[in-house]
Amino acid sequence: MSTIKGKLQVRDPEALGVVVTDWRIVPIPGRGLHRVDDDGLALPLQISSGGQHRAVAELKLTPAEAEQLHVALCYALAGQQPPSDAPECRQPVHYPGGRQRY
């Protein structure tokens, strides 16, 4: 499972009743990316801080936003060897002449 770690800035942390800087945002196992209204996509995420569950939210993307994210991830991962269990689209493509591209 992938984990997004970092600091979440909240304009008024006291309004949440908690002031914590160790936030974790992770995909919810078994509830993967799915289609929503108007052909959009949604990824359910669990949000926790200080080791306690805080919320469940969905990252909603239009098809155009999903394509932009896909392109950004491809550029960010360029040059890195994909793990053995990576999806087919991340496996190397062997071109005639011996060169290899991802």
Image: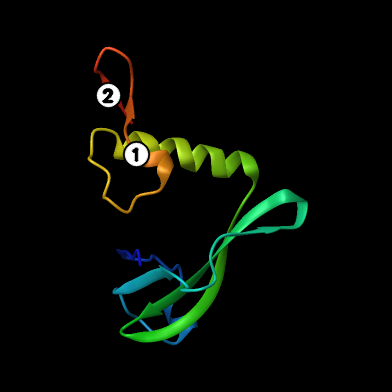
- Residue identified by numbered label 2: 100
Residue 29 vs residue 21, the one in the foreground: 29
> Residue lying farthest right?
38
Disc 1: CA contacts within 10 A as few (<14), some (14-19) or many (>=20): some
- In which quadrant is the N terminus drawn? bottom left
Indicate the amino acid at tag 1: Gln
Q: Secondary structure at mark 1?
A: loop
Image quadrant where one finds the C terminus: top left
x and y percent of residue 63 in the render?
Answer: 64, 43
Residue 76: % across, % down = 32, 38
Q: Amino acid at mark 2?
A: Gln
Q: Quadrant of residue 7?
A: bottom left
Q: Earlier in the sequence, mark 1 or mark 2?
A: 1
Q: Nearer the viewer, residue 94 or 9?
A: 94
Q: Is residue 71 above or below residue 45?
A: above
Residue at left 43%, top 68%? 10
Name the foreground residue: 57 vs 20: 57
Q: Colour scheme in the image?
A: rainbow
Q: Residues within 10 Å of mark 2 (few under 14, many from 20)?
A: few
Please identify the quarter of the rendering in which residue 44 is found. bottom right
Q: Which of these two is toward me, 44 or 54?
A: 44
Give me the disc on residue 16.
none
Q: Residue at x 77, y 51 (%)?
A: 38
Residue wearing tag 1: 91
Q: Position of residue 45 (x, y in %)?
A: 49, 69
In the image, is residue 62 above or below residue 24? Answer: above
Residue shown at the point (38%, 37%) measured from the top left: 74
Identify whether 77 is placed above or below 53.
Answer: above
